[in-house]
Image (tube, rainbow, N blue to C red):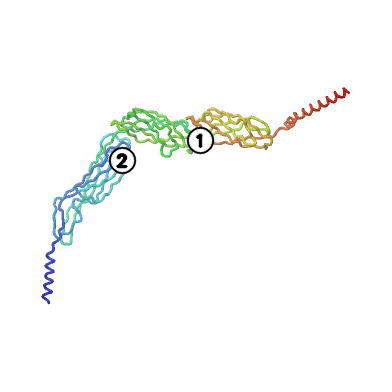
Amino acid sequence: MTYRKFLIVSLVLLLTCSLPVMAVTTYLGGSPKLSAAISGTNEFTPGQDAEITVLVLNSGVNDNKYLWDGTIPREDNPTTAKMVSVGLAAGTAPVVVKSDAQNIGDLTSPNKIPVKMLVKITQDAAEGEYQLPLTIGYTYLVSSSQPDDGTLQSNYLRASETFPITIRIKPQVRIDVIEATADNLSVGTGGFVTLKIKNTGFEDGKKATVKLIRNGDSAIIPSESSVFIGDFPQNGVVTCRYKVGISSDAEKQIYPVDVAVTYENREGDVVTSETDTIGIPVGGKVTFAVVPESASVVQGADQVITIRYQNTGDIPVYSAQARLSAVSPFTSTDNVAYLGDLKPGEGATASYAVSAADDAEIQSYNLDTEVRYRDSLKNSQITDTIKVPVQVVAKPASAGIMQQLPALLVIALIAAGAGYYLLVMRKKK
């Protein structure tokens, strides 16, 4: 029985010794080999907010590869760039880099990772090619050793490399609004905006059109937004005039508008410049001050009243007409008066034919009046309603006698006729 047990144990040990030993792949030598290049366009224009996409590539190759029996597997490959950081700088280029250095993790070989960087090309950037330094920092496995069956020692090194990233700045028309004039702009009306614009860029524009563009929800709304100017050379100056409307819910303040130029560049492409935002002053709503000069009506009488209208707004009005709304106890057969053209501060007097009822109460009444006019664009406008006081006064005492006089005369004539008839009849008898 003891012999049998010994034989079984011996067979198991022999079987165990005959199993194959698992081999571990080990690389000796080699390191990451990094490079960088722009993916997509590398051409930009002055003043542009640009996104530069850089491809970071690892093309490292292992020098030697071994299969070791019984070794501990290596977690890292010598050609893997670990904990990679990528940072872009401006160098001497007319660029402002807005992105901080980015950590992109580990980069095996062969492999690549795109990295996006935000930059701002300065407004005064000159035409030409510029190199931006791209710095890549990483850690990689230098060597590893296994002093015994249960221990693995790895040595890492931190490295940093800088690569030139080439961009090209193309010339462009750049506009500068050197003068902006608002002509008769007021809340709810229309008028003109005149701009003097200079090409401060490095490109000569051809077949150019200057556009006035509404800025978001600005109260200034262009009704004629494009002016063709033809050639627009570097340092050239042009003057453009635009019709605009002002929103009725605006206020008296400065509102923004955008200006841009669409043109044909030296390559024959139609491009649009960066916009220039400027402020345009808008005056308050057109208003009138109303002063009654002679505004009292006798009970039961027809009279002419006069009212003075003064333009208290910020812009001139044209072909102005005033209207008086006659309500009980008044009536009117002539309630519209022509005021003409009125500059700010100027006034005119209107006359209205008004009648008051016989039983009108003796007091002051507020009647509605308004002014209709045309703005600088000949658009018809109307002011808010204005209250004007009109007084009803009592009839004079003599007025009753005068009103009874016709009846008394009739009675007297009848009496005289009757007396004459009686006298004649008596004489006949």
Amino acid of disc 1: Lys
- Marks 1,2: beta carbons within 8 A: no
Which of the 4 image quadrants contains residue 168?
A: top left
What numbered label is drawn on residue 348? none
Residue linked to disc 2: 50
Report x, y in % for residue 364: 64, 37
What numbered label is drawn on residue 285? 1
Report how many numbered discs are placed on residues in the image.
2
Amino acid of disc 2: Ala
Which of the 4 image quadrants contains residue 176?
A: top left
Report x, y in % for residue 426: 87, 24
Q: What residue do we see at 69% from left, 36% from top?
A: 359
Q: Quadrant of the N terminus?
A: bottom left
Q: Is residue 356 left or right of residue 7?
A: right
Reply above or below: 88 against 11.
above
Instruction: Identify the element where label 1 is drawn.
Output: loop
Q: Is residue 216 left or right of residue 16?
A: right
Q: Is residue 90 left or right of residue 297?
A: left
In the rendered image, the residue lying farthest to the top is 428
Q: Is residue 365 left or right of residue 29?
A: right
Q: CA distance from mark 1 to mark 2?
A: 43 Å
Instruction: Identify the element where label 2 is drawn.
Output: strand
In the rendered image, the residue lying farthest to the front is 429
Q: Quadrant of the C terminus?
A: top right
Relative to the observer, which residue lies in front, 36 or 356? 356
Q: What residue do we see at 56% from left, 28% from top?
A: 338
> Is the residue marked by circle 2 packed among few (<14), some (14-19), or many (20+) residues within 10 Å?
some
Report x, y in % for residue 308: 59, 31
Reply above or below: 250 against 207.
below
Label located before the other in sequence (1 or 2): 2
Reply above or below: 165 against 180.
below
Report x, y in % for residue 284: 50, 35
